[in-house]
Image (cartoon, rainbow, N blue to C red):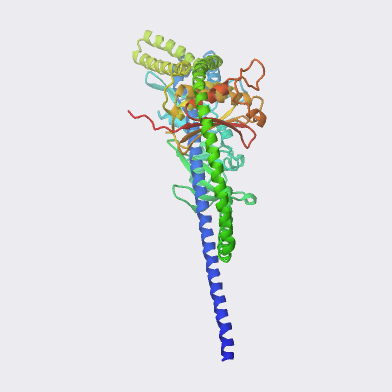
Amino acid sequence: MAAAAQTVLPSVSGSRLLRRFVLWLLVLVCCLGLALLVWRWTENAAIDKLRLAGAQRLDSYAVSLENLLSKYDFLPGTLELNKDVIALLQQPDDELLRAEVNAHLEQLNKLSKSTTIYIVNLQGLTQASSNWREPDSFVGDNVAFRPYVRDALRRTPGGFYGVGTTRGEPGYFFAHGIYHNGRMLGVATVKVNIEKLEKGWVQGTDKVMLTDAHGVVFLSSVPDWKYRALAPLEPAVLQELEVSRQYFSHALLPLGLRELRQLDNGASIVATPAPAERTRMLSQTRSLSPRKWQFVYLSDLAPAEASARNAFLFTWLSEALLVMLVLYARQRRRLGRQRQRARLDLQRAYDHLETMVAERTASLQQMTHNLSEENVVRRHAEQKLRQAQSDLVQAGKMAVLGQMSAGITHELNQPLTALRTMSDNARVLIERGRLDEAKGNLATISQLIARMGALTGQLRQFARKADASLKPVPVAAAITAALFLVERRVEQERVNFRMSMLSQDVHALCDSNRLEQVLVNLFTNALDAMDGCATRQLTVSVTRSFQKAMISVSDTGPGIPEAIRNHLFEPFFTTKPQGQGLGLGLAISEQIIREFGGMLLVESTTAGGARFIIELPIAEPETT
């Protein structure tokens, strides 16, 4: 019997160890599976965030490109209103007339800030050009092979991006037929440089490309990727590009992007072409109609992969901690006496805490009574302060309008020049009995006058004194109105402006006129801070956080030291030289935002500049 008992005991002990081993193995497998699920979920969430940011940037780039091109779309059609241009196409051997047209095109090219403006006859020969003084002038060149010339000769306004065959300078070409008494005499062409858009496309490790209908990259934030094809081109396409000389001497080799995984909504994960630096990136596209162009935005997935790894490790550590807590709980069950003693100590501490809370409550009640009395006095002082602040805000607006007069004069100069030319032409056309053409000139004059009225209307809106009522205000409209008042200075100082907005329908509960005053003050301070800096980047972003609208204004200036930030919103405190500011702008702005029920905050950016954040209550838009 003793021997049998000795045989059974080791068997029972071994069975218990086996059950424990199986249990811990199951726990390990479950923990690993959960960690992998967290890994995948975190990676997908990070990719969705990148897709949202990439889509917003693509929309911003597309709007910037369309705005730039739309500024010049009407220009070629106005040249047929010039009698000298018509006369030159009818008398191509008149050199004196050619010199007058060359001078006119040269002056018009300077005013419009285009690259080149030139006139082509029906055979494709250039009769006059704005670069007639240059050694490689376009005058006398045959451009009949260009698609935009062929389209214009077929009575279809042409648009075409290509590399110049004379200077090798790329640009976008606008072409429009020149008619006289219903008969085509030639083609007016305007060349515009859109390469400057690339400067605003740099997004750290992210990359941006703009391709044509054949998938050829002609604009990119990576210089080595320009004039490369996303995929190998068909022989017929290569032949077509060779005939039109769209990219002149460039070889158009394949870029070498490799697709790794296809996602929904047209997105995909690709590998970059450089073997030594091959990385996984998120690829998103946006088509531009009717030009058949396509923006491609590549977001670096390294941060998303790092977040997934960190989530995986955090889950592992959390699970290990949970297991340790379970073991600890089992251990605690064996320490009943110590738990009872700790409960008694906790009860005594709780009683002591209740005594302290009662004493503190009595003290707070006394403080509340004193504050109520002080609040009555403060209300009277605040009424006087609001009146003084309103007068200071209006005075600040008048000062800003004085600084803006030179910029508005420049903006009105080009429409006034066009008005003078078209009015003279209209008078001549009326004298000649060509009333239909004169009506067309007068309609164009009316459009230009409406544009000038919109410019002056913004100034009248900004100059009026705001009332005290609060209502839903579209944040995007307020930013646009404020930006309009400093746009000229942004252009003159070559500041790169960037705006990021998740949604266009964000409304804040405030007064639009006073919000615009705060934004103009922040924009002006940012431009002053970046004076003399090598990199000048003004960034405005709008987000929603719970029931708050967050407006962020960032610059790349020298930043604000901690000691100065503590006094930044104090009246009459300024870091500007004497005579350049009273130190009231930020103090008034902070008071205005506080009256709206929000806050004005300041912090340093990672790049070393300053960021001002406006928090305002979210409001639902008014319905009519």
Q: Position of residue 580 (x, y in %)?
A: 63, 17
Residue situated in front as seen by the camera: 595 or 155: 595
Q: Position of residue 442 (x, y in %)?
A: 38, 14
Q: Say which residue appears at 40% left-offset and 9% top-offset.
A: 427
> Please, is residue 381 above or below residue 299 in the view?
above
> Please, is residue 59 above or below residue 302 in the view?
above
Residue situated in front as seen by the camera: 494 or 370: 370
> Please, is residue 22 above or below residue 609 in the view?
below
Q: Is residue 570 visible?
A: yes
Q: Position of residue 449 (x, y in %)?
A: 42, 15
Residue situated in front as seen by the camera: 593 or 220: 593
Q: Is residue 169 visible?
A: no
Q: Say which residue appears at 48% left-offset and 41% top-offset.
A: 55
Quadrant showing the N terminus: bottom right
Tag count: 0
Residue situated in front as seen by the camera: 63 or 500: 500
The quarter of the picture where residue 247 lies is top right
Query: Would you say 430 lies left or right of 387 here?
Result: left
Quadrant showing the C terminus: top left
The quarter of the picture where residue 313 lies is bottom right
Q: Position of residue 86 (x, y in %)?
A: 45, 17
Q: Say which residue appears at 48% left-offset and 42% top-offset.
A: 52
Q: Residue furthest left?
A: 624
Q: Residue furthest top?
A: 431
